[in-house]
Amino acid sequence: MFKNLFLVCCAVLAVSGLPYYAQDISGFISQDVGLETADDKQISAAVAKAPQQALAHYATGVRSAFIPQNKMGHFSADFQINGRYVLGMIDTGATYVAINTSTARRLGLGLTNADFKHQVQTANGLARSALVVLDRMNVGSISVSNVEAFVLDDKALTATLIGMSFMSRLQSYRVKNNNLELIN
């Protein structure tokens, strides 16, 4: 009985210490590893490459994602929106997530001309837009549901912008070592 209690106490102490030891580890997992189908060598290699922060969220409930700065100085990543991958650029100067009509069609958003009843100010001037709610947006282990977004004509917007309607739903975000860390 005391042996089992001792083992449980050791396990609790080990798990509770993960966030402390993980706070100064940098890096991120560049690819998902299907642990249920991987062999022991693949699992060992994945654990060796994975930062301790990835393990820490199991103990704390905190999830994070790292987006590296690109050559242009922007933070872009593959976001999963309504189950489909879309390259999105972080834009904290944008009030809402903004997508173009081609992307909206790929995401399964059925919009009509009557839906484009709003006007938004873009870098290229005023543009007609439709306000939509995206069911779910994911990046890394971060997941946010019911995100408001504007859909603009393809001529008015060529890239997907990840604005504050997504970013403000996070616990925090910061830039460190040329990586944008998102924390939820």
Image (cartoon, rainbow, N blue to C red):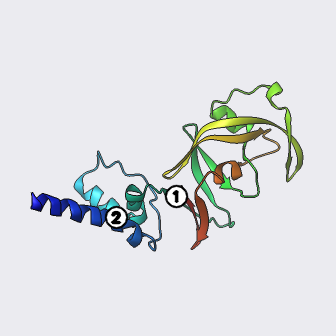
Of callouts 2 and 1, the N-terminal one:
2
From what the image shows, is residue 14 above or below residue 4? below
From what the image shows, is residue 182 above or below residue 156? below
The residue where tag 1 is placed is: 65
- Residue 13, position as x, y percentages in the image: 28, 66
The residue where tag 2 is placed is: 16
- Residue 96, position as x, y percentages in the image: 73, 47
Which residue occupies the foreground of this view, 78 or 142?
142
Rate crowding at label 1 as few (under 14), some (14 to 19) or many (20 or more) other CA atoms within 10 Å: many
> Label 1's element?
strand
Answer left or right for 14 relative to 141: left
The residue that appears at 77% across and 25% down in the rendered structure is: 112
- Which amino acid, mark 1? Ala
Which residue occupies the foreground of this view, 5 or 105?
5
Rendering quarter of residue 153: top right
* Furthest residue toward right: 125
> Label 2's element?
helix
Answer left or right for 40 relative to 122: left
The N terminus, quarter of image = bottom left
The residue that appears at 35% across and 48% down in the rendered structure is: 34
Can I make out residue 162 in this image? no
Which residue occupies the foreground of this view, 49 or 12?
12
The label shown at residue 144 is: none
From what the image shows, is residue 109 above or below residue 31? above
The residue that appears at 48% across and 52% down in the rendered structure is: 141
* Furthest residue toward front: 2
Q: Are marks 2 and 1 in contact (CB under 8 Å)?
A: no
Which residue occupies the foreground of this view, 144 or 90?
144
- Residue 107, position as x, y percentages in the image: 63, 34
- Residue 68, position as x, y percentages in the image: 57, 64
Can I make out residue 150 in this image? yes
